[in-house]
Image (cartoon, grey):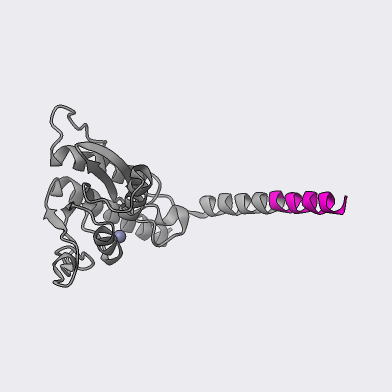
Amino acid sequence: MWLSFSFKISRALTTVEKLARLSEMQEQRTDKKTAPECPFAPLAPSYLVRDKEFFMKHAYNQALKAWKESEVPVGAVIEMNSQIVAFAHNMVETTKDPTAHAEILAISQAAAKLGDWRLNECTLYVTKEPCPMCSGACVMARLKKVVYAVPDPKMGFLGGALKIHEVPTLNHHLEVECGVLAEQCQQMIKTFFMLKRKSAENADVC
Ligand SMILES: [Zn+2]
């Protein structure tokens, strides 16, 4: 009797906690700064040729989704045997999680889908050069290759600021390629920050 009563109380508490958490998340969502309107349209990858541009176009479309959710527009897809096994976009603001970068989310998704943390047969396509955290994750996930569009000379660790994949003691060889669809992806990131700055300046004036 007492056990059943305490079970009911604990269930009721769990529900109350859940409701409190939900309303907290809704408040956070309302507080979240809205992104400037996105002037770019999604690209239409041709399914006839599954080349590097095909996969990067999908990553580009993921980046657009990030923009529409007020995130810095970075998108990623993971390919294996010409199939997309994971796709993700930056979700740092939405989740309030500094590790929720597109690459990390895509790697976790691919590992869960394939049932293996070793992604030796997989290539990651991402619209911007991976940061130190994501570059490390690419090595730890044993990815075959990383293809990125825009180099990042300040924070990029796969050629920009540092070449983590060329550390001689690493026990995994990671191929890296840069520049696929670079112009379009660069344009999107540049425009996002330019419009954000503009709207911040306008807000200061008002
Ligand atoms: Zn990152």
Q: Quadrant of ligand 1?
A: bottom left
Above or below for 73 versus 134 = above
Q: Which residues are magenta?
A: 1-15
- From the image, which quarter does the C terminus lie in? bottom left
| Residue 141 location (% of width, % of height) | 28, 57
| Residue 52 location (% of width, % of height) | 14, 42
Whether the magenta-drawn stretch holds residue 2 is answered as yes
**Quadrant of the rendered image containing residue 162:** bottom left
Q: Nearer the viewer, residue 21 or 145?
A: 145
Residue at 29%, 60% (x, y): give it: 137
Whether the magenta-drawn stretch holds residue 55 is answered as no
Q: Among all residues in the image, which is located at the extreme right?
A: 1
Q: Nearer the viewer, residue 31 or 161?
A: 161
Q: Tell whether 12 sits left or right of 94.
A: right
Q: Tell whether 181 sits left or right of 43.
A: left
**Quadrant of the rendered image containing residue 57:** top left
Above or below for 166 versus 175 = below
How many numbered callouts?
0
Q: Tell whether 133 sits left or right of 186.
A: right
User: Most prominent secondary structure in the magenta stretch?
Assistant: helix
Asked if one can make out residue 181 in the rendered structure from this viewpoint, the answer is yes
| Residue 17 location (% of width, % of height) | 68, 54
Residue at 70%, 48% (x, y): give it: 15
Above or below for 196 versus 164 = above
Residue at 13%, 67% (x, y): give it: 166
Asked if one can make out residue 37 in the rendered structure from this viewpoint, the answer is no
| Residue 61 location (% of width, % of height) | 27, 40
